Amino acid sequence: MAIEIFPSSPSSGDSIELVFSGAYCVDSTTRERLGTEFQFTINLSELCLAPPPIYSESWNVGRLTPGDYTASVNFSNGISESQAFTVSQGTLPFATAIPGLGVVGLALLALAVVLIANMQRTRLKTRR
């Protein structure tokens, strides 16, 4: 069974897809996430053609936080396989910048400075 991770070097900004494929006669499947492990269970069919058909199933697990993960497949006959992968920190979807005040904010800031200056001047006059 091949376990593929798309993209091959995922980041936290990527939608991640796990693909399980191989030549098997599959009766049913289940999926389960247990913490950082994604478990895919395949119940094999008792009746099978020779050679068995190619089977493939995708699991879109979405975006993941940065860290180490494992994708595993467990067969009803006791065989299991796993593939470790690491999700790196993605880039921000926007450029970081210092926020601006805008025209209204700048006008309010100027008004506040003038009012504070007038209050200080008034206090100084009353002390004399």
Image: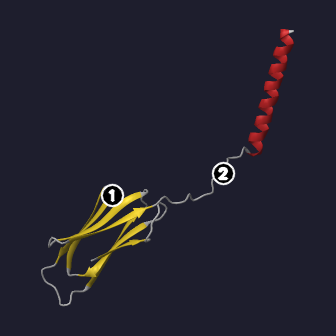
Height in image: 52 above or below 100? below
How far from the left and from the top, in percent, is residue 39?
Answer: 27, 64
* Residue drawn 63% across the image and 57% down it: 95
Q: Quadrant of the N terminus?
A: bottom left
- Identify the coloring: secondary structure
Height in image: 89 above or below 55? above
Distance of label 2 from label 1 (alpha carbons): 34 Å
For label 1, the residue is: 36
Which residue in the rendered view is the most extreme toward the bottom?
A: 50
How far from the left and from the top, in percent, is residue 113?
Answer: 79, 30
**Quarter of the rendering containing residue 110:** top right
For label 2, the residue is: 97
Of the residues under marks 2 and 1, which one precedes in the sequence? 1
Task: Tell me if 119 is positioned left or right of 67 in this view.
Answer: right
* Residue drawn 77% across the image and 40% down it: 106
Q: Amino acid at mark 2?
A: Ala
Q: Amino acid at mark 1?
A: Thr
**Quarter of the rendering containing residue 62:** bottom left
Q: Nearer the viewer, residue 41 or 1?
A: 1
Q: Quadrant of the C terminus?
A: top right
- Category of crowding for the residue at label 1, using alpha-carbon neighbours closer than 10 angstroms: few (below 14), some (14–19), many (at least 20): few
* Residue drawn 63% across the image and 53% down it: 96
Height in image: 82 above or below 108? below
Of helix, strand and loop, which one carries label 2? Answer: loop
Of helix, strand and loop, which one carries label 1? Answer: loop
Height in image: 37 above or below 45? above
Q: Nearer the viewer, residue 47 or 11?
A: 11
Which dot marks residue 116?
A: none
**Quarter of the rendering containing residue 31:** bottom left
- Category of crowding for the residue at label 2, using alpha-carbon neighbours closer than 10 angstroms: few (below 14), some (14–19), many (at least 20): few
Asked if residue 63 can be seen in this view, the reply is: yes
